Image (cartoon, rainbow, N blue to C red):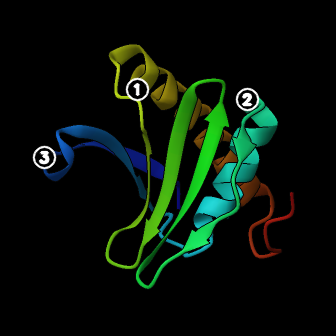
Amino acid sequence: MEVTYKKHINVDKKNRIEFLLINWDYEDGGDYLAKIFCREFGMLAEEKVDYIYFSVIKLHLGKITYELLWHEDFGNIIYSIEQEEEIVDTLEQRLKAVLGILNEKLKTNMGTGLEW
């Protein structure tokens, strides 16, 4: 099972571009992704905020803020608060790199649990 993503335009959020993670709908999945984003790109993660049906982890790098969101209805998504084309393109490239690392970890640790 490979973790991938689908680019989505959320018309309910002023056409915000979001990346829905496929095969990664775990409630704590954002925690793992946040660790990789921080390690690979020097981002800083805020503490996860839990709500009734969803949770959010904010990632910062300079003036850029990403939100990793888990929702019980659709799993994990990530998006940039800043929606300029260059920033969204950079997020997509970083997400591809993070998923490459995650998929390699999943192959390596199949059945043994994820260790970071």
Give left or right: position of 15 versus 25.
left
Give left or right: position of 12 versus 105.
left
Q: Earlier in the sequence, mark 2 or mark 1?
A: 2
Q: Position of residue 5 (x, y in %)?
A: 41, 47
C-beta proximity under 8 Å, tags 3 and 2: no
Q: Nearer the viewer, residue 14 or 5?
A: 14
| Residue position for label 1 | 88
Amino acid at dot 2: Phe
Residue drawn 86% across and 63% down? 115
In the picture, the quarter occupied by the C terminus is bottom right
Give left or right: position of 12 versus 100.
left
Amino acid at dot 3: Val
| Residue position for label 2 | 41
Disc 3 crowd rating (10 Å Cα; few below 14, some 14-19, many 20+) is few
Amino acid at dot 1: Val
In three-dimensional space, the C-alpha distance between marks 2 and 1, rounded to whole angstroms, equals: 15 Å
Residue pushed farthest front?
63
